[in-house]
Amino acid sequence: MLSRRTFLKTSAAAGAALGLGITPSLWAKAKVKGSASLDVLIKNGLIYAGDGRAPISGDLGIKDGKIAAIGNLGNAANQVLDAAGRAVSPGFFDIHSHTNTNLLQCPPGDSKLYQGVTTDVGGTCGGSPFPYSDAEFAEQKDQLRFGYPSWQHIDGFYNALEKNKIGINYASFTGQGQLRSIAVGRNADQATPDQIKLMKDLLAKQLEMGSIGMSSGLEYAPGSYASDEELIELCKVVAEYNGLFCIHMRDEGDRVAESLKDTIEIARRSGVRLQISHFKAANPTNWHKMPIMLKTIDQAVASGVDIAFDRYPYTAFSTGLSIFVPLEYLQGSNADAVARLQESHKGKEIARHLSSRIQGLGGPQNVIITSCRQPENLAYRGKSLQEGAQMAGMEFGAFARHLLISENMRVSMIAFAMSEDNLQLLYAHRLSMPGSDGSVISPQGPLSTGLPHPRSYGTFTRFLGTYVREQKVIDLQTAIYKMTALPASRLGIKDRGLLIPGYQADVVVFDPATVRELATYVQPHQFNKGIEHVFVNGVWTVKNEQHTGALAGSAIRLG
C-alpha cells in the first residue's frame, strides 16, 4: 500500500507530465449514451474549461456529482439549465482564506458561495484550528466546540465539518504558529533540536491526515519568533509530501524587498513549493518596489524555485490593531501584552511606536476601526483612528494604546496602504491569482456583526467586474484560469479546477456583462450580482442567485 508521501510524489510527477491543456478531441470523445441519463444538463453556455484557452459554445452534462460530458448533448436530462449568453466555468478557488471554524457557524458558506467560490482554503497566516498539544486536548476534550466534540488533529476537525454538512468544499493548511505554540510556547525563545523535532512530527501527522501544506504568519506572534533555519527544517517536511508553503512574509512594508529575498531563500534551501500570501508593498514610500520585486520572483523561478502568489483586489488590508505593537512586547498571553501596555514607561514607548507605524501608512485617517466589544468603545466602530482620537480627546497613538488595553488586544481594523497601479501590475503577472484573505461570513446569524473587510464578500466578483471587464488588465479566459486551474494545481488537488469529464462537478454559471460586487467598506454584508448558478459536487446549490438549501460540500483530504 502506498504511503501518502509516495502517492503525492508519484501523482505530482504524472500531473506535471499531463499539463493543463484540454484538446477538442478530448471533448469530442466526452459523450454519454443518451442525455436522459444526465442528472443536470447546462445548455448553450460559453464553456471555459479553466485552462486559459478560449471558450467553446455548447452543453455540459453532470452525472453522479461529476462532469459526464461536454458537447452537443440534446435536450433530455433530469434538470435542464439554459445558460445562453452566460459563462460556464469551474468553481472558483479561494486559495487564501481565514474561514477555519466559521463553516461550523455558517454551514452554507454564504459570503464565499455567492461569489462563485466552491473550494475555500483555510489555516493561513500561521493559524489553524489544529493541532493541539496533549495537555490542551485533555483540558478541552470533554467540551463541545460549536456543538461538536473537540478535536486534536485535522482529521477530527474535518470530521466535525462533514458531520455538520457544509455548502462548499474546504481544505486547510497547518499553521506554523500553532505548531510553535505547542512546542516552544508564545515566547521569542530559540527552538531546541527536540522542539523542532516535535514540530516536524506534528506537521507530518497533519500532512498524513490530508493537510495541504503549512502556512506561516511572520508578522504575528508566536510564528514570527521562528528563525529562518527553523522554518527551513519545517519546510523540508512539507516538501517531502509535495505540499505547499503559504507565507505571510516577515515584512510587507519598509523591508518588504528584503523579506521577499529571505522567503525565496527559505524555499530554495528546503525545496518546498512556495505561495506568497496577499503579496503587497504597503505604505506609499514602498509602492515603487513592486516592479523590482516581480523581477526578483521571475529570476527565482528561472533558477528553479517554484513560486506563485495571491492578492485580494482592494487597496486596504485588514488585521488586528496589535500588528503595530513591536513583537517583543507581544510575547506570552494577551494579558501579558496588556500589562506591558499599562506600564508607564513601556506603554508610552509602545504608543510612540504605534504613532510611527500609523504615520507610515499615511496617517490615522487611513486606519478604520472595524470591531470593538466593550460597550464604551462601540461608538468608535466604523470611525478612523483620527476621528476616534478626537472623540476621546487623545493623541492617536495614545488612543490606539487605550483601545488595545480596554479590548484585551482584540481590536480589528482596515488600513488603506496599497497602490491601485501595483494591483493592476500584480494581476497582469502570469503567476498571480486572487485570494480573499477573508472568511466565510453572512448577513444573518452569529457571523453578521461588525464591519468586516468587503473582500470576504466581493473578492472574486470585483476581480471579474473591475479588473477584467472594466480595466481589461487580463482577458476573461485568463482570469478564470487564475481562479480555477492555477490554484488547484498549486494546492495539488487533481480532480477540480477544470471542466473535464470525470472531474468533480464544481461549476459556476455567471454573466460576464453584469458580474460585480456590492459589498462596501461601509456596508460590507451584501451579496453580489451576476453569479447566477453554482453547482457543488454536482448539486445545484445556488439557483437564480438564491440558495437552494443544499449542503453538498466536502472536506478535501489531499491524497
Image (spheres, rainbow, N blue to C red):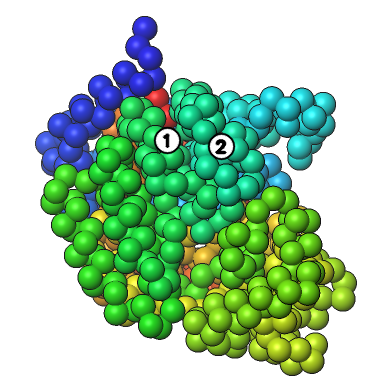
Q: Are marks 1 and 2 in contact (CB under 8 Å)?
A: yes
* Residue positioned most to the top: 1
Residue 175 is at least partly visible in this image: no
Give the quadrant of residue 352. bottom right
SS under mark 2: helix
**Closer-to-camera residue (416/230):** 230
Q: Residues within 10 Å of mark 1 (few under 14, many from 20)?
A: many
Q: Which residue is mark 2?
A: 179
The C terminus - image quarter: top left
Q: Is residue 256 left or right of residue 208?
A: left
**Closer-to-camera residue (327/37):** 327
Q: Give the total of numbered labels.
A: 2
Q: Earlier in the sequence, mark 1 or mark 2?
A: 2
- For image coordinates 58% across by 73% down, the residue present is 414
Q: Is residue 360 left or right of residue 420?
A: right
Residue type at tag 2: Leu
**550 up-or-down from 314: above or below:** above
The N terminus - image quarter: top left
Q: Residues within 10 Å of mark 2 (few under 14, many from 20)?
A: many
Q: Is residue 242 left or right of residue 198?
A: left
Residue 360 at x, y = what percent?
49, 82
Give the quadrant of residue 33. top left
